[in-house]
Image (spheres, rainbow, N blue to C red):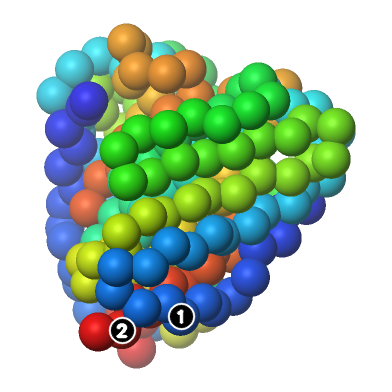
Amino acid sequence: GQNIDQPTEMTATEGAIVQINCTYQTSGFNGLFWYQQHAGEAPTFLSYNVLDGLEEKGRFSSFLSRSKGYSYLLLKELQMKDSASYLCAVRGTNAGKSTFGDGTTLTVKP
Amino acid sequence: SAVISQKPSRDICQRGTSLTIQCQVDSQVTMMFWYRQQPGQSLTLIATANQGSEATYESGFVIDKFPISRPNLTFSTLTVSNMSPEDSSIYLCSVEHRGAVRGTQYFGPGTRLTVL
């Protein structure tokens, strides 16, 4: 099975940088995904890592170390609209299913 | 990306009744999933909806309680049967879309269910 850990809550200031960590233990690995979920809305895809290293997409970057079972999502130049829950999800090798972490609620303050 | 709609968007139901939730996708997709998300919590996979065959249920979820249909590659239904207040939750369908990064899921807007 999969076990995914991420912090429950984080707070940061508008314009700053924040790093949200995710550690996982898995019996099979076929990619790690980050999703953003605003309150009352459905999750939306942010980023994907399957190989070690950093993937950059605008203000958002995601890093993966498979040997350490570790990923982080880096958000730069924070904006108020970035206040949301960020979900780390690991896709296993069993029928393409993904397991989601409990999510990190990020609050951006002025 | 895929455009996904769900009906109803919300409902309030009486204990002991059943509710069927519909999920419609604007293109053919191979993988469709049903999740449950309770307030402030993460997504719990209920089952994978398989086209033309029985759904594959996760541990703790059974077909009698959550029957699923998937008659074609663009549509699925989830029924919540014999409801109790513990079934109050948001139910979301998701799909993996051809052309996207393999494994990327696109989610419907969700159905907010309250059982009294």
In the rendered structure, are the residues bearing label 1 and label 2 in contact, judged by CB atoms less than 8 Å apart? yes
**Where does the image place residue B3, in percent across and percent down from the top left?**
16, 32
Q: Is residue A10 above or below residue B105?
A: below
Q: Quadrant of residue B60?
A: bottom right
Q: Is residue A70 above or below residue B101?
A: below
Q: Quadrant of the N terminus of chain A?
A: top right
**Where does the image place residue A69, in percent across and percent down from the top left?**
79, 41
How dense is the environment of label 1, judged by Cα within 10 Å: few (below 14), some, or many (20 and up)? few
Viewer-proximal residue among B113 and A70? A70
Is the residue at mark 1 from the same chain as the one at mark 2? yes
Residue at the spot 19% in from the left edge and 17% down from the top edge: B27
Label 1's element? strand
Find disc 2 in the rendering and name its residue: A109
Chain under label 1?
A
Q: Is residue A28 above or below residue B52?
A: below
Find disc 1 in the rendering and name its residue: A11
Q: Residue furthest bottom?
A: B116
Viewer-proximal residue among A42 and B66? A42
Q: Is residue A103 above or below residue B101?
A: below
Residue at the spot 41% in from the left edge and 55% down from the top edge: A75
Residue at the spot 47% in from the left edge and 17% down from the top edge: B102
Residue A64 seen in the current view: yes
Viewer-proximal residue among B42 and A60? A60
Residue at the spot 30% in from the left edge and 38% down from the top edge: A58
Q: Quadrant of the C terminus of chain A?
A: bottom left
In three-dimensional space, the C-alpha distance between marks 1 and 2, rounded to whole angstroms, equals: 7 Å
The amino acid at mark 2 is: Lys
The amino acid at mark 1 is: Thr
Compared across the picture, whether B48 is left or right of B92 comes to right
Residue B18 seen in the current view: no
Total marks shown come to: 2
